Each structure stands twice: as structure tokens, then as C-alpha cells.
Image (cartoon, rainbow, N blue to C red):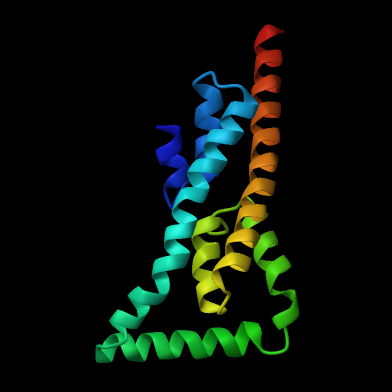
Amino acid sequence: MVMLLAMSPISELRGAIPLAIAYGYSPLEAYTISVVGNLIPVALLLRFLGPISSFLMRYPTGFRFFTWLFSRTRRKYIEGREGIGFAALMLFVAIPLPMTGAWTGCVLAFLLGFRFIPAFLSIALGVLIAGVVVTAAVSGAFALGNTIQGI
């Protein structure tokens, strides 16, 4: 259940780590299971977003949508900033807030034209950092809750 939650696009490891710790896993076990689960779909997403968009661009609606999306993204976010992409993507994924996880990072990497290896490494580093942040926060919250119950 923890692995599936970590693989899902909504909760990712932000939902999986608290669940794992609530189930009685140690923080290290919760971190490891959640990070691995969160990284499983990354390779698939990075590999197949291009072919899927190419397929959809065969149709007039898909062509108009992707042409608009690519030109807008490149104009707004890429021009003049190509050198900071790796670190920016990593930090974007590392911030454990809604809509900033690995799934969104894959879409951004695709839209920004990242190659597979740099995108995967950047997203993986972001997931590792987010996992540490979430594990520390959840472990602290559980410890605080146990302390308060003991008073």
C-alpha cells in the first residue's frame, strides 16, 4: 500500500511516508520504500511523454495544444535560463508541496526539453531531498504527539 501511494501522482512520498510510519515502519524503512516507489514511474514518464505527445500531435486539436504549450513554456521559462535548469528542476521536485513532486517534475522536464539522464538525475535528487524533509517532519510530529500523549 505504501509503495502504491508513493507511485501515485497525487500523494507521492508526501502521503506514503506518513502512512508507512503510521503502519509501524521505521523512518529509514518508510523513506526507502517511499523514495523507491516515487522513482518507479519517473523513468516511464520521461520515456513515454515524448512519444505520447507526438502521437497526439497528429490530430489538429493535439497539434494546436502542444504547439501552444511548448512555445509558451519555452518563451516564459527557458529563454535566457538554460544553464540553471538542472538545479531548478531538482529544487522544484524537492519542495514537498502539492504539485511539486516527481510527476510534475517529469512534465516540466519534458516541456523544457531535458534529455533523459539529466532529467532523471535531477528529479531523483529532488525526490531524495523531499524524502528527507518529509521523513524528518513526520518523525518529529509523531514524536511530539507521543510526548504530548505521555503528559
In the rendered image, the vertical position of residue 150 relative to residue 136, given as above or below: above
* Quadrant in the rendering for residue 74: bottom right
Q: Residue furthest top?
A: 150
State the quadrant of the N terminus. Answer: top left
Pick the residue in front: 98 or 65. 65
Which residue is the extreme one toward the left? 59
How many numbered marks appear?
0
Q: Is residue 120 left or right of residue 80?
A: left
| Residue name at image x 67 percent, y 89 percent | 79
Q: Is residue 47 left or right of residue 138?
A: left
Name the residue located 73 percent from the left edge and 66 percent from the top edge. 87
Q: Nearer the viewer, residue 115 or 56?
A: 115
Q: Nearer the viewer, residue 143 or 91?
A: 91
**Percent position of residue 108, x then y:** 54, 71
What is the x, y in percent for residue 142? 64, 23
Residue 97 located left or right of residue 84: left
Q: Is residue 83 above or below residue 103?
A: below
Where residue 34 appears, as percent x and y from the top left, is: 53, 38
Residue 90 in view here: yes
Residue 92 seen anywhere in this rendered image of the structure: no
Q: In screen coordinates, is 43 left or right of 51?
A: right
Tell me which residue sits at (53%, 42%) in the image. Answer: 36
Q: Name the residue located 57 percent from the left edge and 74 percent from the top edge.
A: 115
Name the quadrant of the C terminus. top right
Above or below residue 69? Residue 104 is above
